[in-house]
Amino acid sequence: MNIWKKYKNSSFILKMSAGFVLGILVGVIFGPEAVLLKPLGTLLIKLLNLIATPVVFLTVVLAVNQMNPAQLGRTGGKLILYYGITTAAAVLIGLGLSLLINPGNSLSLPNAEVNKPETPIVSDVILSIVPDNFLTAFTTGNLMAIMFLAIIIGFTISGMRFSTDEKIQKYGSQLQSILDAANVLFFRILQGIMLYAPIGIFAIGATAFGTQGWDTFTSLVKFTGVFYLGIIILWVFVYSGFLKMFKIPVRKFFINTKDAYTTAFFTSSSIATLPVAIESAKKAGISEKMVNFSLPLGAVFNSDGGALRMGASIVFAANVSGAQFSPIDFLTIILVGTLLSIGTAGVPAAGLVTLSAVLTMFDLPLEIVALIAGVDAIIGMAGTASNVIGDVVGAAVVDQSEKKYESEAQVLR
């Protein structure tokens, strides 16, 4: 019992890393015989696939539902535009670097079958966002349709909660309570899955290294290197570019907000870092009103690190499985990556859930999720730091924009 408590309460990053390292050792020592552990890894894949859709759906519904319609004016529009630009940029950076460096091209998955994704017609992609009926979206696993339903339902419930009709308002609050309870339910299930995750990663690592040897290690090092290079580019060119555009001193800004992104790096949780991020943003001179509105919104809606990882992971998965993508496929990936970034919750390892759903959408083997999970702890640290600093940069530039707007409005008066 004491061993279980110690395991349960130990660092998630430590457990994931230890599972992967032990898997490497077993794979190297036992070679092909390590494939006997494969069912343990397959179980993790099935569990992640099981939980993916409800977690994404509920996260998005509740995120939209939490916004007062009155706040979706000028400030909300600017923030959403900023999130869309930086998230799309992150996906493009991940895709571009991965296509240039090609991580995973020397690696293959044993017995992994993949069907080449059919190149869709643009109009079909747009029409597929709207499902024929509610249940079809979930039974077919159409994430674009699920996102559409989540946004529509979230806005509708939000409108009900802020209605002037007391009866409608009551129903809106009841629906929110039901969704909150369902969200807690599935996240508790996810927490249970994450307790098993190190064992599944151990098995996948052992199987992969037992059959692939050091090609696996070099491919994952290459993949991690691509991701960190992408993070550097995102910070130096995208975030710093936005700050310079709005005449905010870059060096001073990053010094004042260092508590936010260093806490995010070590905790791998945007939500856990939120109180620290709020204090850091105020220290950087951002108005309290903007901080209190934008940072909680960004913690759920903005996930640049997750978007970059998604772009890189899709190319990595395609290289491992031998799939070929057309330009239209990559445009779809950018669109999906941008939209699904709001479904990546601000907790450790939630990106793996979203990634498993995206790989399913593109008919790529889910074994790759477990393979990437071996370095997820390292990737998640930099990814979460980017998510948090991206939120703070967004608050800073929109706050500066609003100050300029109000100043010009006063002059006109």
Image: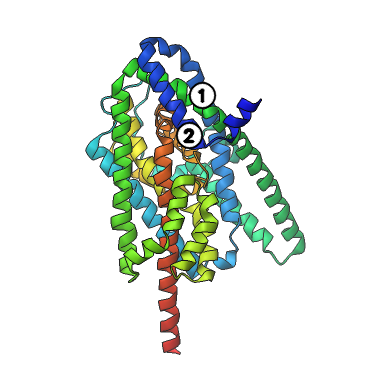
Q: Which residue is mark 2?
A: 14
- Residue 99 vs 111, above or below: the answer is below
Disc 1 secondary structure class:
helix
Residue appearing at x 38%, y 65% in the figure: 253
Specify the amino acid type for callout 2.
Leu
- Picture coordinates of residue 65, whole percent (x, y): 60, 55
Residue appearing at x 46%, y 50% in the figure: 264
Q: Are marks 2 and 1 in contact (CB under 8 Å)?
A: no
Residue that sits furthest to the bottom in the current view: 413
In terms of image quadrants, where is residue 105? top left
Considering only order in the chain, which callout, 1 or 2, is on the residue closer to the N terminus? Answer: 2
Left or right relative to 251: residue 273: right
- Picture coordinates of residue 128, whole percent (x, y): 46, 42
- Can residue 100 be seen here? The reply is yes
- Picture coordinates of residue 369, whole percent (x, y): 43, 30
Q: Quadrant of the N terminus?
A: top right
In terms of image quadrants, where is residue 361? top left
Q: Within 10 Å of the Cα at label 1, are there few (<14), some (14-19), or many (20+) other Cα atoms? A: many
Q: In the rendered view, how is the structure colored?
A: rainbow
Closer to the camera, 354 or 3? 3
Left or right relative to 41: residue 29: left
- Residue 364 vs 80, above or below: the answer is above
Disc 2 secondary structure class:
helix
Q: Nearer the viewer, mark 2 or mark 1?
A: 2
Q: Which residue is mark 1?
A: 199
**What's the distance in space between the residues labelled 2 and 1, CA to CA?**
13 Å
